[in-house]
Amino acid sequence: MKKKTNKEFRLHLLICAGTGCVANRSYEIKEELVKEITRRGLNTEVRVAITGCNGYCERGPILVVQPDGVFYQKVRKEDVPCIVEEHILKGKPVESLMYRPSPDAPPISRMMDIDFFKHQTSVVFRNRSRLDPEDIEDYLRFDGYKALKKALVEMNSGQIIAEIKLSGLRGRGGAGFPTGLKWELCRKSPGNIKYIVCNGDEGDPGAFMDRSVLEADPHAVIEGMIIGARAIGAHKGFIYVRKEYPLAVKRVKIALVQAEEYGFVGENILGTGCDFSVDVVQGSGAFVCGEETALLTSIEGRVGRPRPRPPYPIEKGLWGRPTNINNVETWANVPQIISKGAEWFSGIGTKRSKGTKIFSLVGKINNTGLVEVPMGITVREIVDEIGGGIPGGKEFKAVQTGGPSGGCIPKSLLDLPIDYESLVKAGSMMGSGGMIVMDEDTCMVDIARYFLDFTLHESCGKCPSCRLGTKQMVEILDRITEGEGKEGDIEFLEDIGKNVKLASLCGLGQTAANPVLTTIKYFRDEYLAHIKEKRCPALVCKSLISYVIDPELCGGCTVCAKNCPSDAITGEPKEIYTIDQKKCTKCGICLTVCPPKFKAVKKVSPPVK
């Protein structure tokens, strides 16, 4: 029986099946939709399918009705009959399931009218909410593999490389090295055997860009790799994905099987004589394997540890052969550049940072999720216009970019443009695209300690500077947050941090101190408060705070005493209660349960003795 084409359906019900929505049972919603559509006899006019990550993760499960672009959020299984009855049959979209910017605001029906989406520029995410990542036919309907045909039939390797160079595409994995130049150098490296590698080892806390691209549009990554292989002269490729990404692994493997069936992967691709095969390699979750030489060592079956450079992988990579490594997002950009031209791509972004960048926007922000924005956009535009500002009317304090090895950008730099050079100048970096927003309740000393502790435990331990330097810095930060900081600690942290940066072999060690150095640079007053006044201005560090009950506000309701797990709160009903500081474990339950009409429990710093 001939498969029905997209154009023959009146409506498409597209359920987000990225990891976040799948965790919220989006597959159950799909099954319920299929059941209801079948029961109503609408199979011939309504298509039900999954898509990859929509981006607006906190609003999941998400259902988009195409071609009108109606966006339904936080959909439940019980909502399905109403959607089918009202929207599909009667043509009346269900307002109660639509997005509202605030509880009293009117509903917004179309996805592209929502602030979170309308301020973005989709290049890598061009197919979001419109194709099934497990169906190659969907990818082909949206011009999939047309760029590959152009590259194999109409262009030679030199022309492909020239187009990528002219586009200004730079590596999206963090370093920002010019992609076209990297390809050219690998092409010129002597040797008949060369390799292509896709780096999908994404280990930054709060980052999920590469995972979502692989889940949503795996064929775009594969197509980019084949074009790169043609340009460089490689016949074998590897997609390296961490084992914690089972859905991404599953969809990449499905896509590879389908691509081979259609003649896009394997021998004599499209009859051009080009041969290229791809293997999927699963990493064990070591953060250091995001570094390219450690990743190569892991693919070879050994413990992932960085190698000295030079020689660089383009000269001596996998099994001593020239190897070109780019990350997921970089490869996904390639088909668009070949298809639409370098001039189109270079027209997006800034003079030195071309195109778009995907960020995972998380933390103290109203709209969390994945965003794709043009290079050069400011921090303020991302936080306020796309992110919707800070929850609860709190003040923006800082944003961490570049993962645990990135730096913290303060409020004074809200208008900083997001590009490679500007971020480095500010003491941070682009990284793979993690963006963690912090509000006034964040302790910058504690956050620096958190990120550095993560890096310490993820260090391979090969370099003494990284292994011992980060350990010593964490010990100092532990002392400071516990109220035992002393004069000279700040200067000592700066000195160790600079030495770790200079003496470490790989990017992990070279950037490990960034969170500490930038927080000292922009929030030195908080360090001084911790050390000299034994006070945590953000009221976060347990050793430097106390919970007290304001006698003028206490209503004697007994709620705090009944909920205290350490029996530290005493008093008589309808009388004033007090907290025994020696018994208090500073769990904060009393503050949480104190009735809003009293608000008698307070957090104070320095601590009450």
Image (tube, grey):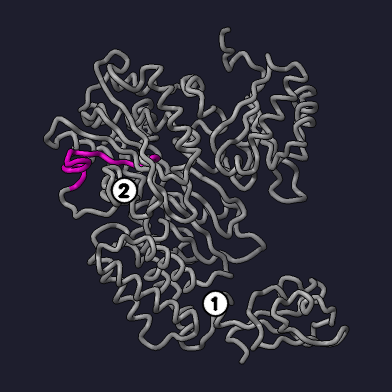
Please, is residue 154 above or below residue 56 in the view? Answer: above
Indicate whether residue 314 is drawn in magenta: yes
Q: Which residue is drawn at 57% across and 14% down?
A: 5
Which of discs 1 and 2 lies nearer the camera? The answer is 1
Which amino acid is tagged 2?
Gly
Tell me how far mark 1 sits from mark 2, CA to CA.
36 Å
The magenta region covers 312-329
Q: Residue 24, located in which quarter of the rendered image?
A: top right
For the residue pair 567 and 390, the one nearer the viewer reads as: 567
Percent of width and height locating residue 51: 56, 32
Please, is residue 453 above or below residue 211 in the view? Answer: below
Residue located farthest toward the bottom when viewing the structure as drawn = 609
Give the residue pinned by disc 1: 541
Give the residue pinned by disc 2: 176
Please, is residue 529 above or below residue 389 in the view? Answer: below
Q: Which residue is drawn at 39% across and 77% down?
A: 475
Percent of width and height locating residue 269: 31, 18
* Helix, strand or loop under label 1: loop
Which amino acid is tagged 1?
Cys
